[in-house]
Amino acid sequence: MERTVARVALFAALIAALGLIPQIVIPFAGGVPITAQTLGIMLAGLILGPWRALLAVLVFLAVLAMGAPLLAGGRGGLGVFAGPTVGFLIGWPVAAIVTGWLFRMMAGTQGRPGRFQAKFWPGVIASIVGGILALYLFGVVGMAVVTDLSLAAATLAVLIFIPGDVLKAVVAGLIAQQAARARPDLLE
């Protein structure tokens, strides 16, 4: 139990720390910046698994809602849940679950603790499906609602994020692979 609490807290802190990397504001993206924090969501899913990753993201979002300036650019408080990034914030827990679940299924670790062999491509694919596709579903809808963009216009606006998010998925796959080599028990 203590290990779970420590890992959840560690990944909530990792997501917050990735917010220290300066954001890139894209004027035509409805006010949604490019940040490194989605890398933390992907890593949480890959390393913690779906349910612990969910807990880590929920802890992060709770502290954010209480006013801590944890988002890139020093944003925090309830106001961020009324801005153009609300769909992405709501999608983070789902992205973490999908990433973790898909990675466990693809890497063959479901129900077989102690036999985990991390693979690079399952990590990348799970990160793309969970950390990009599932996340963008929520992000596009949230952006469309808050900015009065049509769903088509919001979808076009988020296309600018895809190259960077694919790069984050590759980095997440590499980190998960190396973590499994160093500490196979870490990913059980």
Image: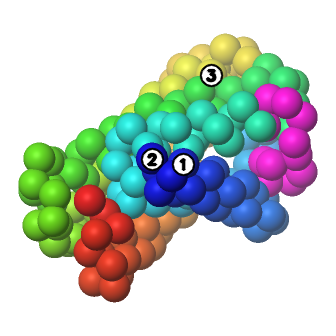
Classed neighbour count for the residue bearing mark 3: other residues with Cα under 10 Å, few (<14), some (14–19), many (≥20) = many
Q: Amino acid at mark 1?
A: Val
> For the residues marked 2 and 1, what is the alpha-carbon distance in whole angstroms?
6 Å
**Residue 74, magenta (yes or no):** yes
In the depicted structure, whether residue 72 falls above or below residue 136: below
Circle 2/circle 1 CB separation < 8 Å:
yes
Between discs 3 and 2, the one toward the N terminus: 2
Q: Amino acid at mark 2?
A: Met
Q: Main secondary structure of the magenta part?
A: loop
Between discs 1 and 3, the one toward the N terminus: 1
Secondary element type, mark 2: loop
Q: Which residue is mark 2?
A: 1
Label 1 vs label 3, nearer the camera:
1
Secondary element type, mark 1: helix
Determine the residue positioned at 47% across, 56% down. Answer: 3
Determine the residue positioned at 34% across, 85% down. Answer: 182
In the depicted structure, whether residue 57 falls above or below residue 2: above
> For the residues marked 3 and 2, what is the alpha-carbon distance in whole angstroms?
35 Å
> For the residues marked 1 and 3, what is the alpha-carbon distance in whole angstroms?
31 Å
Q: Is residue 123 left or right of residue 109?
A: right
Secondary element type, mark 3: helix
Q: Which residue is mark 1?
A: 5
Q: Amino acid at mark 3?
A: Gly
Please tell me which residue lies in front, 132 or 107: 107
Classed neighbour count for the residue bearing mark 2: other residues with Cα under 10 Å, few (<14), some (14–19), many (≥20) = few
Q: Which residue is mark 3?
A: 142
